[in-house]
Image: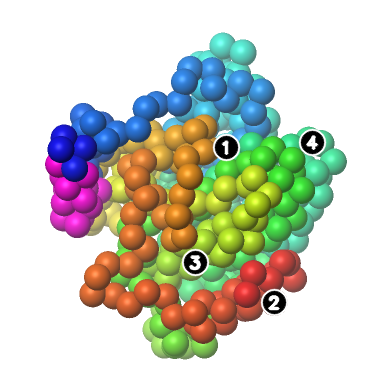
Amino acid sequence: MKQTLARLVDSALDRSVVLGYTAVGSDVRRRLPTWPADPAPGSMTGRRVVVTGATSGIGEAMARSFLDLGATVHLLGRNADKVAAYARELRQAVPNADVVEEVCDVSDLDAVRAWCTDLVGRVDALHGLVHNAGVMPPERTESPQGHELSLACHVLGPHLMTSLLRDLLVAGPASVVWMSSGGMYGASLHAQDADDVEYRRGEYDGVQAYARTKRMQVVMADAWAEQLRGTGVLVESMHPGWATTPGVTASLPRFDRLTRRVKRTAADGADTAVWLVATRPPSQPGHFWHDRRQRPTTFGWQRGEDPALRARLLAYVAGATGAASLA
Ligand SMILES: NC(=O)c1ccc[n+]([C@@H]2O[C@H](COP(=O)([O-])OP(=O)(O)OC[C@H]3O[C@@H](n4cnc5c(N)ncnc54)[C@H](OP(=O)(O)O)[C@@H]3O)[C@@H](O)[C@H]2O)c1
């Protein structure tokens, strides 16, 4: 009975959005009997995790949490100075911290190929890969290969990386987490998006491009979960709620001001990714999580993803990256 009530409270928080996504959501859920146990101290000792976008906000907090659990953490950022500075800070803060500095622009497919080739030559296995790097360009910007930047950063680069690191992930076996956003609920896969994945038509809207590619991340994670079923590799996506980070302050200043008093910490935003990698819970198709519980990928008034649109997206991503087709 207590568990049923707790689940109802949790779901009500989720549907209310404002309460569920803020610090209220994580604070209340932590007190419910349905809140899963924390990973055991030291439970990631001897395990190796790559966190992309680890030089700010949620990625920074996540790297620290993995280190606190004993993992070797590969801090991946696009700016070598920032990576070095944060690695230094972590080594000072965490006794015996095993931090590896990694520089790679995940939106640059050539850089991803070079970095993955290098990593494969350096390590034997990965136990975690978190695709956390995120951007919200105010105007349409292109990656070095001419792809729209949020598509390149959120979808193409992570897909190529997952594909090229496949053997390391299987050797772990690893948990792969795609850091999506609750904003993806506002963006189903539409036929016009499937025809214009690169957002070339119409007036560019950075928030819309962000939401669309965050939806695509959920589709990619689900497709990768299916692709890697039986290998031991688990693939999930999640959203962190609304967390105070430099990225939100810079990209959404009005939203940042409005929600300043209620946003959760970056560590709370990172929590589910750390928990997923450390505890490897079973999950069902959809594979989308928030606050340590699997959530629907669409709400009742939306239709489930159209398999034909999904297949077109997967085919586009395979063609653009030259990597594994999940269609
Ligand atoms: N904060 C929230 O409330 C919230 C809500 C929903 C979803 N999210 C998601 O959570 C993730 C982290 O967001 P955040 O709020 O922590 O943002 P943030 O403070 O802006 O951090 C983003 C990180 O991604 C890195 N990055 C961006 N483009 C990159 C690239 N091409 N290659 C490598 N690294 C790159 C940034 O590097 P630099 O330091 O060099 O810029 C930074 O380390 C994102 O995927 C975001 O969409 C956040």
| Residue sitting at the far right | 121
- Amino acid carrying label 2: it is Gly
State the residue at coordinates (64%, 69%).
326
Drawn side of residue 51 relative to residue 134, left or right: right
Magenta stretch prevailing secondary structure? helix
Q: Is residue 31 magenta?
A: no
Q: CA distance from mark 3 to mark 4?
A: 29 Å
Drawn side of residue 89 relative to residue 21, left or right: right
Residue 313 visible to an observer of this rendering: yes
Q: Position of residue 82 (x, y in %)?
A: 57, 37
* Lower sequence index among marks 1 and 2: 1
- Which mark, residue 219? 3
State the residue at coordinates (19%, 57%).
15
- Amino acid carrying label 1: it is Lys
- Which mark, residue 319? 2
- From this view, report whether residue 97 is shown above or below residue 133: above
> Toward the viewer: 73 or 31?
31
Range of residues picked out in magenta? 5-21
Residue 106 visible to an observer of this rendering: no
Ligand 1: does it lie within 8 Å of the C-beta at label 1? yes
- From this view, report whether residue 15 is shown above or below residue 192: above
- Which mark, residue 124? 4
